[in-house]
Image (spheres, rainbow, N blue to C red):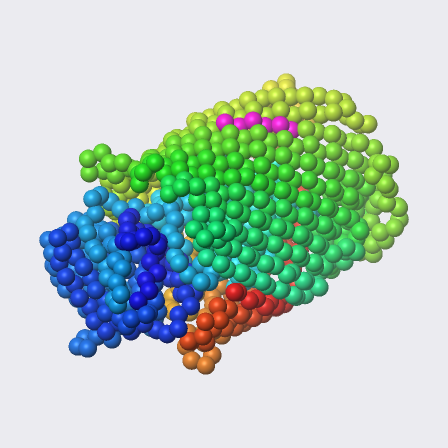
Amino acid sequence: MEVKPVKADKGLTPLVSPPRVSDLDNYHTQARWLVQTSTVIVTGVQVNPTETGLEIVLEIPPDQTVQPLIFSEENTLIIDILGAVLQLPESEEFRVENPNSETTEVTVTQLDAESIRITITGKERVPIAEVKPSADNLVLSVTPSSSTRETPREEIEVVATGEQQQESYFVPNASTATGTDAPIMETPFSVKVVPQEVIRQQQAIRIQDVLSNVSGVVSGGSSQGRGINFNIRGFGTPSGSSVPVLKDGYRIYGVFVPAPETANLEQVEVLKGPASILYGEIEPGGIINLVSKKPLPQFFNEIELQVGEWGLVRPRFDLTGPIDSNGNLLYRLNGLYKHEWSFRDFDRAMERYSVAPVLAWKIGNNTDVLFSVEYINDTGPADFGLVKYGDGVAPIPRTRVINNPDDTVDTDSLSAGYSFEHRFNENWKLRNSFRYLSYNFDFSVVALPGFFADDRTFVRFWANQGGQQRSYSFYTNAVGKFATGSINHELLVGIDLNHSEDRITTRFGEESPIDIFNPDYNIVPKPLRSELPLFGDTTNEADRLGIYLQNQVYFLDNLILVAGVRYDTVTLKTTNAQTDLTDAGESEQTDDAFIPRVGLLYRLIRELSLFANYSQSFRPSTQTTASGEALEPERGKGFEVGVKTELFQKKLLATLTYFDITKENVVVTDPANPFFSIAAGEQQSQGFELDVTGEILPGWKIIASYSYIDAKVTEDTDPSLVGNRLFGVPYNMASLWMTYEIQSGALQGLGFGAGLNYVGDRFGDLANTYTVGDYFIGNAAIFYQRDCPRGKACGHRYRFALNFRNISDADYIEAVAGIDSSIEPGQPFTVIGSFSVEF
């Protein structure tokens, strides 16, 4: 008999500190890719006491392969045997109580059609299991553990012959909220995870489409193609103060955030509320963390071709596996090309090239390092969207271009870095990482200043803007687990260093007006860049230092306190070079802050957690007063109370939250000097959120969200703004996406998906002078995936899919930027088809 344990080793295979049962779905889907010639039949079970504990014997035929997966839940060790059927001669399950003084119960049951579950419940602590070599049977040696609280390992290896791909919507753990890989049910903060399976089944090419599944998140537009912006719980505006977007925990600093590539994502995590304690200066609404795919310990290859409306062609590949025979070197390589025309009347298509190599090196048993690079090159049209007209949006076709059809924006981004981890023992580890980011763009357009010369003619100017952004980030932290009496602790202490710089040059030319109802784009010929006067040449530099301390305290198994504090200091320097129209100048300022956070969670029962938290944020301002003094940093503070629940045998997670966030020292106009600003404003956001993700029944998956947000101005030097709603923020938003895949029979592998998105009406600017209407769009999908026929060792999977977006062809506005232009229309009815093969 051949045993493929969780981690292969010579002799016994120790399985110490197993992952929690909440991780189970992840590894089930990973390990089911074992190529087996037939289902293993278990015909008998024996439990025998030994000098050190117990020996559990599963009687199976010789020369068979089994796959044990080991998990834990409190005092219970759970072992799932995949590709196995229990056929006992006298009963459908096996159970023995109190087999020795350390064990309460041992059970062996049929989990589903192709899996057996073994549970071993310790009287005071979770046991330890070892797989023993045997010529015939599967033999497990069980001994008591020496610690009172078992915690999950950061990594687990499953020997398999296919991809360890997350096929479940349910993701039990997330690291963004606490900096440790903590179960969401034990995290006293609101965090939502969109897994890879949702991205795949929705064929979400844009990150905006991925985040439409998350409550409280609104797209803030694309900065005319130069970057992306998001708004969480009402906070986050374009041009430098958007909600932070992280990649694998690294901040992406700069005036513009490059649009990420979804094909390289394992999942997307959204942490709600002020979160400066781990991530420095941010908007108080929250952060977005993009988690990239990592190398796998077995060979897996996938190629896919997507085609669709507007000439979409998007081939991609995903390759991973070991480099050496010992599995100490692993690689992963993702790459794609995309070509697509806009549904709007531009003369130029959008093109993207992307490649992302990753190398994982296991230096020793306790030391790992991961090297990663990602390069993205984009070319395409610069889109200023539609424009304000009266108290709404101009009544023109959504396909019409108000700037010029040949306006262009070219961007490229490069990120490179490493992540190092050394484990001193089971309780203490040190992590160190570095990330370099480079982002360049060239922007040749007709700029829209945002006013009408008359009721038809919109004023425009020829413009060119170029930008170079660089960021260097260095993070070091230590994580330690220890106990003080009966109280367990997980301590996180770290230091962050970052230097970023960007240079933006802007040129403006002569006026080029346009009749929005009967446009003529050739009234004024497009000038060369060298013919445009240099209007601005600005260099911004920032140096950041953050030191933080956090303690996760487990008073009881069901009462958890997370408390921490961060000290941040930020130095900002702005240099304006002499130009044709402006004088040279320089300013520098330093701001610092102590930022606390505290959260408390009580797990009322295993399926229900109650939580509350209070946190703060801060963000320095680059503006000055009339006297030249730096403005006070914006400060955010907020609290949450909520409930989390795991349902349907811990396959579905739901979170309901009430939040209240206030942002102080908001930059507003100085009433005594209208050309300058002061930090005297205040904004507040209150509301409710509901997020649901997981599996209701086998094959029936769901991800859904709802939010009610009341975000408004509470203090301002302009009395007319007080009480106004923050722009781009609807009162109500909702999303729903469900899929069902037939589990057996001739149609096994055939699946269907359906969903909707609703966004309420929004104001387009802070003065609330115009609105964009609400919208409701429906989406659907049909897919079919085919594995190897039973008994065949082909090692392949084929998948076909068709996705239909905006089925009713609704005419709607997706994003506003707080000005009278850059009102971005949403895509009309779209069909995307794909074919992929995994081998």
Q: Is residue 793 left or right of residue 762?
A: left
- Which residue: 59% across, 63% down? 304
For the N terminus, the image quarter is bottom left
Please, which residue is most extreme toward the bottom here? Answer: 746
Magenta stretch: includes residue 542: yes
Where in the figure is residue 593, as x and y percent of width and height? 46, 26
Residue at the location (71% across, 21% down)?
Answer: 585
Q: In this rendering, does residue 753 appear at all?
A: no
Place of residue 601 in the rendered image (x, y in percent of width and height, measured from the top left): 31, 44
Is the residue 633 above or below the residue 436 in the image?
Answer: above
Q: Specify the quadrant of the image occupied by residue 134.
A: bottom left
> Which of the 4 image quadrants contains residue 487?
top left
Instruction: Pick the residue in front: 609 or 83.
Output: 83
Question: Given the current orientation, which residue lies at the most extreme top position?
Answer: 627
The stretch drawn in magenta includes residue 560: no
Q: What range is drawn magenta here?
A: 540-545
Residue 141, compared with residue 668, is above or below; it is below
Q: Is residue 792 visible?
A: yes
Measured along the vertical axis of the image, is residue 107 above or below residue 410? below
Taking depth in this image into account, of 171 and 476 the one nearest to the observer is 476
In the rendered image, the vertical position of residue 159 relative to residue 547, given as above or below:
below
Q: Is residue 500 left or right of residue 6?
A: right
Q: Position of residue 259 (x, y in %)?
A: 62, 48
- Residue 292, horizontal then vertical, whole percent: 51, 49
Secondary structure predominantly adopted by residues drawn in magenta: strand
- Image check: 388 left or right of 175? right
User: What is the tally of numbered marks visible in this picture?
Assistant: 0
For the point 81% across and 41% down, the residue is: 462
